[in-house]
Image (spheres, rainbow, N blue to C red):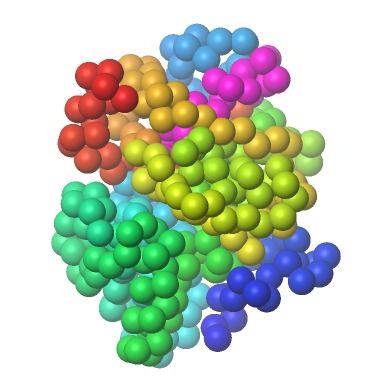
């Protein structure tokens, strides 16, 4: 098994495993990404402050400006550049609802690495088309993301490919942490972050960066109420799996907590909340109105969570991430029309 990849059964075995990556891991990943990605903007919108209320000053990290329109480009490039050359040449495999696969396809194209991605049946056709356009082989199998993970592991075994899990991979987590290294370089005033959680790579990246570079700053997690496995696990103090993941924010539609991120989330988060699909849709509309940026459901969850946490964060400077802009046309139409 490659050094950067960890099997779920191996994670969280002892106190040292609570933090799956270090600041040094993030800094090394940042160096590996420098030839391929430029820093994304961190912007302040007074109109957004007014929409949030409570005297909260909001800084927006525009990961929707990454080449495949999502922060997952960092994760994928970090993971692939950490592989041995012969592993990259053989190729990688992963499951995705879209953005992890888009990131891998983009990274694979830059690094001449074959990429196979497994998506659930009925997955966003525009994301599928984007992955194929970047050269990835897209396999549609399984009723949901978790079933597609099983398919990806089977294909990887059959073809001798390296699995790059969207969460249970240290290279992926180090890539996500580079986002927060940039935030802390760009704004010395940020003292809290509200971060969407699907698998938790972005939140763990924030925790690692803040813990080392901004002690005392707090990280709050947000998950879709219809896909609450991470939230339920955090509240219970143990990893749990839910029967379903029902949200239009497909980047958050997972049924499990993950062994590599759960211990850090449990140890480091200031709080964890859930938001409804209606709240996510309203956050998308607010971001369109105040920042004039296209954002998908999962990319608006940080703002939706900030709405829930506004009183607790009154008067503070808070970072949120527009983590992706790959919303399909029909979902965007429904959001703008107020049907969600």
The image quadrant of residue 173 is bottom right
Is 147 above or below relative to 269?
Answer: below
Residue 334 can be seen in this image: yes
Membership of 122 in magenta stretch: no
In depth, the one of 216 and 27 nearer the eye is 216
Q: Position of residue 103 (x, y in %)?
A: 35, 59
Picture residue at 40% right of the left edge, 24% below the top: 278
Q: Residue furthest front?
A: 243
Residue 290 is situated, as x and y percent measured from the top left of the image, at 37, 17
- Residue shown at 33% from the left, 17% from the top: 289
Give the residue displayed 61% in from the left and 27% down from the top: 318
Question: What residue occupies the far right of the structure in this picture?
Answer: 15
| Residue 19 position by quadrant | bottom right
What segment carries the magenta color?
Answer: 298-317
Q: Which one is in front, 275 or 268?
A: 275
Q: Position of residue 8 (x, y in %)?
A: 61, 71
172, 275: nearer the viewer: 275
**Does residue 49 appear to the left or right of 263 in the view shown?**
left
* Quarter occupied by residue 28: bottom right
Q: Which of the image's four quarters has the N terminus?
A: bottom right
Q: Residue 275, image x and y in percent?
A: 51, 30
Left of 24 or right of it: where is 110?
A: left
Would residue 296 appear left or right of 77 to someone viewing this image? Answer: left
Determine whether 45 is above or below 124 in the image.
above
Q: Left of 294 or right of it: where is 312?
A: right
């Amino acid at each position: 098994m490659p050094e950067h990849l960890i099997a779920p059964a191996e994670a969280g075995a002892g106190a040292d495993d609570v933090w799956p990556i270090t600041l040094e891991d993030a800094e090394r990943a940042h160096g590996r990404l420098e030839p391929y990605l430029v820093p994304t903007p961190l912007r302040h919108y007074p109109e957004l402050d007014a929409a949030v209320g409570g005297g909260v000053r909001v800084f927006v990290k525009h990961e929707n400006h990454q080449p495949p329109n999502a922060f997952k480009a960092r994760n994928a490039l970090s993971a692939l550049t950490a592989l041995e050359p012969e592993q990259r040449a053989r190729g990688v495999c992963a499951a995705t609802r879209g953005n992890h696969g888009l990131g891998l396809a983009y990274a694979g194209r830059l690094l001449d690495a074959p990429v196979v991605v497994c998506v659930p049946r009925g997955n966003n056709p525009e994301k599928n088309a984007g992955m194929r356009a970047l050269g990835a082989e897209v396999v549609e199998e399984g009723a949901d993301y978790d079933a597609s993970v099983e398919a990806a592991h089977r294909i990887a075994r059959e073809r001798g490919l390296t699995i790059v899990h969207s969460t249970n991979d240290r290279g992926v987590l180090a890539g996500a942490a580079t986002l927060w290294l940039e935030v802390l370089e760009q704004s010395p005033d940020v003292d809290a972050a509200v971060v969407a959680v699907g698998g938790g790579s972005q939140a763990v990246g924030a925790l690692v960066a803040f813990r080392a570079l901004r002690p005392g700053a707090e990280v709050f997690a947000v998950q879709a109420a219809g896909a609450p496995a991470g939230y339920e696990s955090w509240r219970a103090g143990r990893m749990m799996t839910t029967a379903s993941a029902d949200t239009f924010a497909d980047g958050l539609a997972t049924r499990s907590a993950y062994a590599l991120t759960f211990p850090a989330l449990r140890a480091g988060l200031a709080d964890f909340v859930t938001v409804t699909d209606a709240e996510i849709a309203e956050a998308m509309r607010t971001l369109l109105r105040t920042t004039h940026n296209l954002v998908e459901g999962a990319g608006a969850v940080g703002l939706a969570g900030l709405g829930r946490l506004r009183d607790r964060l009154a008067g503070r400077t808070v970072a949120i991430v527009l983590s992706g802009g790959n919303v399909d046309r029909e979902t965007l139409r429904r959001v703008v029309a107020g049907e969600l």
